């Protein structure tokens, strides 16, 4: 498996895709901060030229991490099946399970590297260009939130890799991923209004707890990860998702024909 | 000689069709095994099962003596494969693609890349990106990937697709050389049967998913024999005379009226004399060698 990981690392670092994606994401965050900065300069009463406002865009929508993770998976692996790369690896005797695990590891490492670059640009430019704002600890709070959701983000990447092995049609892959990531949690939350048990399970789904237990606005931030219980919830749910999606992926991979 | 591949009652069914039906065959070390069959005969399915890309529905596959899937995965490191399209990354250069597979196969040292690219004639264009390659170059790159790491078994599905005539000759010579010098076993399918004829030492004829016949090149050559194409003014009369005077009934009347006579029992001149002596106009006569194509067509027609 190490050989496969090495080859993938070589391929990813020697092609433009991940650099372009990272540059686009970092560029967008920089652009947001520059716009806020210029708006603040032009109008002294403009209340949004602050670090806390800028960072609140991500803090209140950490599900964005899952979507960006999905984009990373697509950029890295979408053509594997179409271009016959997977066939070669299988024909060379790399087991399907090792391929799945190898891809998941590579994807997680690459995503974290990309995330670090984007965050440095995002947070760095915000701190350099903008006023502090009403939340003095916005930066550590956001970083804590990201750290808490990192395992979950990786789990959703693993889910998408598993879905790629399940469906040949890309659109169905994304649909399956979205249904598990957002539609089922939403539906569970609605059913949970009537049935307590379902409601309790739904509360542990990231799509729901990130919507309901993270309140970020101009007067302050109240985040799930501010309390040890909240941190535990994020981490435990992340580990459960990783184990479940990983097991699903291994089972699907075993039967995959390429 | 040791069997590299043993296949017993191999069947592959999909939801709507059965691509392989109860195929049993053995392939020995050092053979060049030519898979012959029309589209949909099951050639690619067979190769994909050998390569581990798809699973058989029934039957047994023994690869390098390994019976179990896990053992076979280890043994597949001894194989090189091109099935359907050659798989490579279009954004990487030719050299980059080989480096990718070198790392994946765990081959030490980069010297193997130069050696392999020189073997397939891509060294001069090694910096070219995969996406800019012509069909022929793609085939060569696929071949390079398959050859890297000195495989003992090559599984090649239509490897000369897209190659120009000189490329076809180069690949043919290369495969012969690999077989003769390194004793590499090759299983090759091709639509261009004249090409297979110049390579294969054993043939497996597939039709509608079943193995119609397995025969050595030597036996096939003996079996094929000569036939005579004779074009006469009255084919009906001629064939009647053929049966009556020569007691010969192994012939075919083609659509254009040509009488094709197999298993020649007389000198060719006797067949022309048969027409002229009986007032039948003789328009053309050609003595031909039965080709692999003819043999396959007859086999498929007989549905043997």
Image (spheres, rainbow, N blue to C red):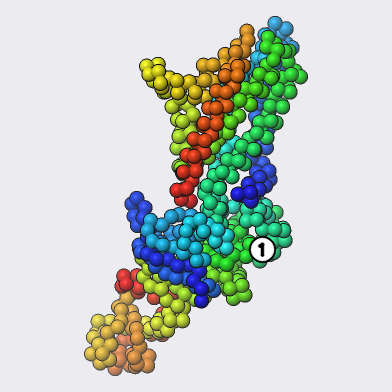
Residue A36 is situated, as x and y percent measured from the top left of the image, at 69, 16
Residue B139 visible here:
no
| Furthest-top residue in this view | A45
Residue A236 is situated, as x and y percent measured from the top left of the image, at 55, 27
In this view of the protein, which residue sits in the foreground, A200 or B112?
A200
Q: How many marks?
A: 1
In this view of the protein, which residue sits in the foreground, B111 or B58?
B58
- Toward which corner of the image does residue B121 lie, by quadrant? bottom right
Q: Chain of mark 1?
A: B
Residue A58 is situated, as x and y percent measured from the top left of the image, at 61, 21
- Toward which corner of the image does residue A104 lie, by quadrant? top right
Q: Residues within 10 Å of mark 1 (few under 14, many from 20)?
A: many
Measuring 72% from the left and 58% from the top, which residue is drawn there? B109
Where is A213 relative to A80, above or below?
Answer: above
Measuring 54% from the left and 20% from the top, which residue is drawn there? A210
SS under mark 1: helix
Task: Check disc 1 and report the residue beneath it.
Answer: B116
- Toward which corner of the image does residue B230 lie, by quadrant? bottom left
In this view of the protein, which residue sits in the foreground, B160 or A59?
A59
Residue B39 is situated, as x and y percent measured from the top left of the image, at 41, 61
Where is A190 relative to B173, above or below?
Answer: above
Measuring 65% from the left and 14% from the top, which residue is drawn there? A53
Measuring 45% from the left and 48% from the top, which residue is drawn there? A255
Check the picture and name the quadrant holding the C terminus of chain B.
Answer: bottom left
Residue B245 visible here:
yes
Q: Is residue A31 left or right of residue B233?
A: right
| Furthest-right residue in this view | A128
């Amino acid at each position: 498996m190490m050989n496969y990981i090495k080859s993938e690392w070589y391929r990813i670092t020697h092609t433009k895709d991940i650099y372009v994606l990272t540059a686009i994401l970092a560029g967008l965050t920089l652009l947001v901060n520059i716009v806020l900065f210029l708006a603040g300069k032009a109008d002294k009463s403009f209340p949004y030229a602050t670090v806390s406002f800028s960072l609140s865009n991500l803090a209140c929508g950490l599900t964005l991490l899952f979507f960006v993770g999905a984009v990373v998976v697509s950029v890295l692996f979408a053509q594997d099946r179409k271009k016959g790369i997977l066939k070669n690896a299988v024909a060379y005797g790399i087991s399907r399970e090792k391929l799945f695990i190898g891809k998941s590891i590579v994807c997680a490492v690459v995503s974290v590297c990309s995330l670090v670059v984007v965050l440095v640009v995002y947070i760095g430019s915000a701190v350099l260009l903008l006023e502090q704002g009403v939340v003095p600890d916005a930066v550590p709070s956001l970083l804590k939130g990201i750290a808490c959701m990192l395992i979950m983000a990786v789990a959703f990447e693993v889910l998408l890799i598993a879905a790629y092995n399940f469906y040949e049609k890309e659109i169905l892959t994304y649909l399956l991923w979205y249904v598990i990531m957002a539609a089922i949690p939403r539906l569970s939350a609605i059913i949970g209004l009537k049935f307590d048990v379902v409601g309790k399970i739904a509360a542990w789904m990231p799509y729901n707890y990130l919507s309901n237990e993270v309140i970020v606005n101009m007067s302050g931030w109240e985040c799930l990860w501010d309390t040890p219980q909240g941190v535990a919830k994020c981490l435990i749910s992340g580990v459960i998702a990783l184990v479940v999606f990983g097991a699903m992926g291994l089972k699907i991979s075993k039967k995959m024909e390429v | 000689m040791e069997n590299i591949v043993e296949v017993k009652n191999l069947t592959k069914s999909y939801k709507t069709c059965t691509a392989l039906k109860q195929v049993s065959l053995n392939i020995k070390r050092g053979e060049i095994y030519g898979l012959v069959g029309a589209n949909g005969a099951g050639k690619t399915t067979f190769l994909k099962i050998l390569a581990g890309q798809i699973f058989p529905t029934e039957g047994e596959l023994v690869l390098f003596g390994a019976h179990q899937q896990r053992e076979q995965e280890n043994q597949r490191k001894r194989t090189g494969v091109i099935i359907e399209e050659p798989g490579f990354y279009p954004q990487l250069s030719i050299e980059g693609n080989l480096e990718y597979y070198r790392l994946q196969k765990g081959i030490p040292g980069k010297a193997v890349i130069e050696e392999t690219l020189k073997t397939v004639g891509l060294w001069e264009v090694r910096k070219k990106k995969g996406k800019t390659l012509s069909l022929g170059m793609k085939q060569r790159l696929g071949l390079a990937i398959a050859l890297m790491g000195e495989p003992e078994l090559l599984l090649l599905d239509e490897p000369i697709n897209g190659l120009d005539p000189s490329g076809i000759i180069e690949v043919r010579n290369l495969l012969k050389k690999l077989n003769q010098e390194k004793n590499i076993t090759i299983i090759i399918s091709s639509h261009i049967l004249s090409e297979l004829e110049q390579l294969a030492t054993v043939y497996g004829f597939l039709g509608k998913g079943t193995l119609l016949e397995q025969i050595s090149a030597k036996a096939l050559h003996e079996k094929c024999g000569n036939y005579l194409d004779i074009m006469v003014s009255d084919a009906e009369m001629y064939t009647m005379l053929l049966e009556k005077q020569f007691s010969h009934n192994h012939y075919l009347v083609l659509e254009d009226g040509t009488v094709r006579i197999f298993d020649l029992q007389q000198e060719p001149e006797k067949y022309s004399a048969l027409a002229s002596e009986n007032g039948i106009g003789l328009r053309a006569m050609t003595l031909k060698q039965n080709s692999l194509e003819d043999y396959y067509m007859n086999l498929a027609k007989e549905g043997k």
